[in-house]
Amino acid sequence: METALIVIGIVLLIILIWLISVSNKFNRLSIKVDESISGIDVALTKRYDVLTKMIEVVKGYTKHEKEIMFKIVELRNNMTIAEKSKVNESMNENFDKIQLLVEKYPVLKASDNFKTLQKAIVDVEEHLQAARRLYNANVSLYNELLLSFPSSIVAKFKGITKRDFFAAKEVERDNVDINI
Amino acid sequence: MYTIIYFFDIIILVIVRFGDIIVSIEELEKLRKKTANLFRCGIIVSFIAAAILFYIKRDTSYIFFGLFIGIALTIILVQIPQKKFRTAFKEYFVLNYLKTIFTDLIYKPEYGLDSSIIENTNMIDMGDRYSSEDYMSGKYKGINVVQADVHIEEIDNDDEGSSSFTLFKGRWMIFEFNKTFKSNLQIYQKGIKSYNLNHSLSKKYYNKVTLEDQEFNNIFTVYAQNEHEAFYILTPHFMERMKNISNNVRGSLLFCFINNKLHIGLYDNNDSFEWNIFKKLDENNLKNTIISDIKAITDFVDELNLDNTLFKEEK
């Protein structure tokens, strides 16, 4: 009887240690995911700033082009990942419009100010892609742990839910004629 | 012992410097043959001397004594023509081929990289004995490149004497990198033995990073001070190129991104820009050997697309 109680005690202790370690693993991964969101925020803010400056420069050269409307969804605090993806999409649309306009205005294309901004946006894009990949890699690890058995039991017990990936199209730099 | 060898080396170098440097392949081939024949003759004479000594004294220990003295004398005698050959090979032929590829070229075969440069990367154990030669710096496609042969050894002293084992032997190359970054990133090709690597306390500031490319993760181990910068530098295209390079080079690779520079250690147990005196020399194989040694440097610029300045901030 005593031996059985000891065995049960040891088994329960092992289960408890395992529960704590899995729970801690979820916490660690959750912190990493949150940290990587801040990377996306920084990159999106930088992209927004550079794109706004670019639009100002473009507007200066294309005053008579009434039909061209630039509208970037503004960044707010506490946005969800889906909302951030939308902001990014709106930035992509504006960037595409700029690219089309630049082709029509060789003077704008050749201006030093625009060239500097174009170079800056390429680097910002690269940082955004890095932040997105890091975030998605962390989310992937988190979701993998959440869905795999037996850690899924701990997830259910703690009420942990899946995290969303940051969807963004890769910037096809090869198709953009930068000519710096 | 090493001090004696060092002084002996300097004396030979002074003697070699007094003569004119060879500038024709035919003359260089003649010198190579002479050096190789001198070496062969020395070895044969050593064996004959050892046999005569054994015949006279009837004691096997005299065989070893005769061989030891004979081989030592041969090595000493061969030093001057061998050094003359090496100097001509490197300071005329290698230099001229390097000039066709690099601009702003500095090539100093007798000099190497300062050990502190490699130590600062925190990549490998610096061991007890460090030597470096074949220092070269220049510009290729507008990119600053530095390279040298490096040999790092660990010396073990015990009751039976001292023994050494190699921690790193190969090339160390430094390239100007086309992206700006603030933290350090280290990448080891798997297969490099753990004892060769640096396990110092300063490593605690690095985190192991898993990239999304599983094939890349199977070939390399990545440590970063900043995970975001690791993903910024290691784009999917760049990882693809690194995988291609790892498939094409002989030996193991170490990459360190530090101070906006890319350090690459190629651990292949080889000396670059050397010619074996027993190998026949003609214009074609001389050119192929030197060009292949130069390509081992330029391939990194070409393959990794380091001359792409799209991300580089203008100064």
Image (cartoon, helix red, strand yellow):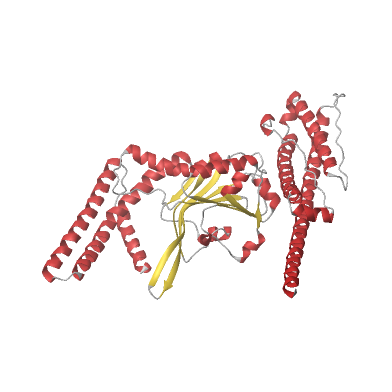
As drawn, the residue found furthest toward the front would be: A1
Q: Foreground residue, B37 or B82?
A: B37
The C terminus of chain B - image quarter: top right
Is B298 drawn above or below residue B170 in the view shown?
Answer: above
**Residue A65 pos. (x, y %):** 85, 24
Where is B80 relative to A75, above or below? below
Residue A85 is left or right of residue B35, and the answer is: right
Residue B136 seen by the camera: yes
Measured from the top left, where is residue A41 in percent x and y?
80, 47
Spot occupied by residue B187 in the image (x, y as percentages of width and height): 59, 52
Corner quadrant of residue A26? bottom right
Res A55 → quadrant? top right
Measuring from the top left, give residue B277's x and y in whole percent: 30, 49
Residue at point 43%, 72% (across, down): B157
How many numbered discs?
0
Q: Nearer the viewer, residue A50 or A111?
A: A50
Q: Is residue A180 left or right of residue B283?
A: right
